[in-house]
């Protein structure tokens, strides 16, 4: 596995993989790698892609400097996981390599999808994500890019970015990974105490409750909210949306939908989602 930091080395290394006839699979991450990231790497390797993993904690997608400062950083363990996952290239760009003009850098506006849910509660978040992902696509030139369904709204934003700006990349959504107790894997989980973790299970339980029987969208929303509040989650939202447009569904809607939940536990923002049926 080759490790690069500079933009010119990164571009040349990705180009070298393509010249050797390999399809390039990109797994963008902010480090603190866990089994969810491993699943993204495995999905790329299963398709025969040369695996390019990027590690960059992107300051432009954090609206709260304290959240950025607290974001877990585990570089040695990340290196080991990338190696074990069979990465061909590990890219750890410096802040200067990514954003040489700092806050003055060009920003990609992520559009209407970005103003709901996580975007409403974290202003500018998805513009920061769209901007960094556009740069990762531009420098790496991947054939496929792998994103977890855990960040379902992010996956929709990235699909829109690739389609609207004409990036020639297949965006592959990989099912989210859960711990045996049901908690969705997230780099933020390490910040929860044992009792915080017990409360956090309210998110996945809310989704199980929503998926347990077909009902009108408003009834599913109510079911989820009650379970989360009972568990001690400070609810940010509990929504039932169209799986492609993320438009909230009304009670006339019938068929497959996506339930999205978010909340705060011990000051840690957690999100989760699952397919549900409304009717
Ligand atoms: O999901 C993440 O870890 C980040 O939002 C991403 C896609 C790597 C962009 O910084």
Image: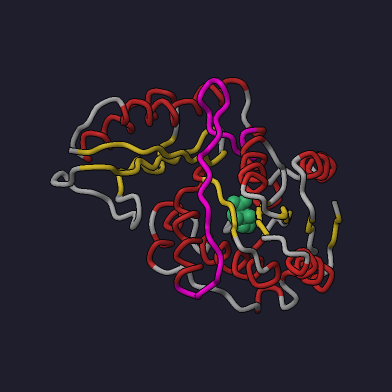
Is 100 magenta? The answer is no
Residue at left 15%, top 44%? 251
Q: Quadrant of residue 113?
A: bottom left
Total numbered labels = 0
Q: Nearer the viewer, residue 264 or 242?
A: 242
Q: Position of residue 163 (x, y in %)?
A: 46, 69
Residue 22: x and y, percent?
71, 60
Tell me, yes or no, if residue 184 can be seen here.
yes
Whether residue 65 is visible, yes or no, is no
- The magenta segment is 164-189
The residue under the point 71% across, 73% down is 102
For the C terminus, the quadrant is top left
Main SS, magenta residues: loop
Residue 15 spot, x, y in % from top left: 76, 70
Q: Would residue 274 be found to the left or right of residue 218 on screen?
A: right
**Above or below: residue 60 compared with residue 251:** below
Please name whichever residue, 134 or 198, is drawn nearer the observer in this view of the structure. 134
Residue found at x 40% / y 37%:
274
User: Image height check: is 75 above or below 61?
Assistant: above
Instruction: Report the side of 134 relative to 273 (left or right).
Output: right
Query: Relative to the observer, which residue lies in front, 15 or 278?
Result: 15
Corner quadrant of residue 17: bottom right
Residue 206, by quadrant, is: top left
> Which quarter of the rendered image does ligand 1 occupy?
bottom right
* Colouring chosen for the image of the structure: secondary structure
Q: Position of residue 13 (x, y in %)?
A: 81, 66
As drawn, the residue found furthest toward the front would be: 21
Q: Is residue 184 magenta?
A: yes
């Amino acid at each position: 596995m080759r490790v690069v930091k500079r933009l010119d080395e990164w571009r040349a290394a990705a180009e070298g993989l393509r010249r050797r006839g390999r399809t390039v699979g990109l797994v963008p991450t902010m480090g603190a790698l866990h089994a969810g990231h491993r699943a993204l790497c495995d999905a790329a390797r299963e398709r025969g892609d040369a695996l390019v993993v990027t590690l960059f904690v992107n300051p432009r997608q954090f609206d709260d400097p304290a959240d950025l400062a607290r974001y877990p950083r585990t570089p040695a363990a990340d290196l080991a996981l990338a190696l074990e996952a069979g990465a061909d290239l590990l890219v750890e760009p410096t802040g200067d390599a990514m954003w040489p003009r700092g806050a003055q850098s060009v920003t990609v506006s992520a559009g209407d999808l970005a103003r709901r849910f996580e975007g409403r509660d974290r202003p500018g978040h998805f513009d920061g994500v769209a901007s960094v992902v556009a740069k990762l696509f531009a420098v790496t030139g991947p054939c496929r890019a792998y994103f977890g369904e855990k960040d379902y709204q992010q996956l929709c934003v990235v699909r829109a970015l690739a389609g609207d700006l004409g990036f020639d990349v297949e965006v592959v959504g990989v099912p989210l990974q859960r711990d045996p107790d049901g908690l969705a894997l997230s780099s933020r989980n390490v910040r929860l105490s044992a009792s915080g973790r017990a409360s956090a299970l309210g998110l996945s339980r809310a989704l199980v409750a929503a998926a347990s029987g077909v009902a009108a969208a408003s009834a599913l929303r109510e079911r989820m909210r009650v379970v989360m509040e009972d568990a001690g989650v400070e609810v940010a939202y509990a929504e039932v949306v169209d799986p492609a447009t993320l438009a909230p569904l009304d009670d006339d809607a019938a068929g497959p939908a996506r339930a999205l939940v978010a909340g705060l536990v011990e000051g840690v923002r957690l999100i989760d989602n699952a397919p549900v049926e409304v009717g």
